[in-house]
Image (spheres, grey):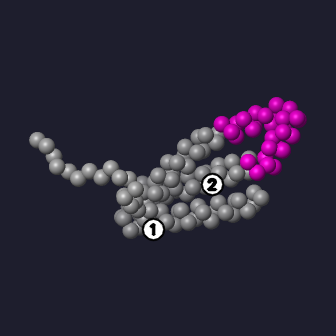
Amino acid sequence: MKKQRPVNLDLSTIKMHAAANASILHRVSGVIMVFAIGILLWTLSLSLSSAEGFAQVESLLSGLFFKIIILGTLSALIYHLLGGIRHLFMDLGHFEELASGNATAKLIIALWLVLTVVVGVRLW
């Protein structure tokens, strides 16, 4: 038996709703944090090795490149925390409908952007 189902392989034509984007961003932020652990452990190890190592980490953290890395790591942490709280509420049976799920996804994304800007201003 041959099934005649429509196949859409052009991913650029698919419009995802806010809840789908929030879910994907939650996964991406988790992956970013996994890779950030390596950088953070390296800087911790270097800073604890000696006084010169601490001075080297201090000079690295004052540079633009590491500030961007720290901002990205903190941004991923903020989003993952907010998205995790949203998912916990969904596990409890709240915001499972399409309208409320999309509304909370938009709220989480907006709150994430605001908090990232606040952290960025505080970092610089």
Residue 37's label in the rendered image is none
The one nearer the camera, 40 or 91, is 40
Residue 75's label in the rendered image is 2
Left or right? Give the position of 122 relative to 95: right
Name which residue lies at 35% across and 52% down: 10
Residue 87: percent from left, percent from top: 46, 55
Regarding residue 79, the answer to whether it shows in the image is: yes
Left or right? Give the position of 59 relative to 108: right
**Residue 117 placement: quadrant:** bottom right
Q: Residues within 10 Å of mark 2 (few under 14, many from 20)?
A: many
What residue range appears in magenta? 38-65
Examine the structure image and report whether residue 60 is included in the region drawn in magenta.
Answer: yes
Residue 57: percent from left, percent from top: 81, 41
Cα distance in 3D space between marks 1 and 2: 21 Å
Name which residue lies at 61% across and 51% down: 77
Q: Secondary structure at mark 1?
A: helix
Query: Which amino acid type corresponds to the residue marked 2 in the rendered image?
Result: Ser
Q: Secondary structure at mark 2?
A: helix
Residue carrying label 1: 103
Query: Which amino acid type corresponds to the residue marked 1 in the rendered image?
Result: Ala
Regarding residue 94, the answer to whether it shows in the image is: no
Residue 22: percent from left, percent from top: 48, 57
**Residue 101 placement: quadrant:** bottom left
Which quadrant would the C terminus be assigned to in this image? bottom right
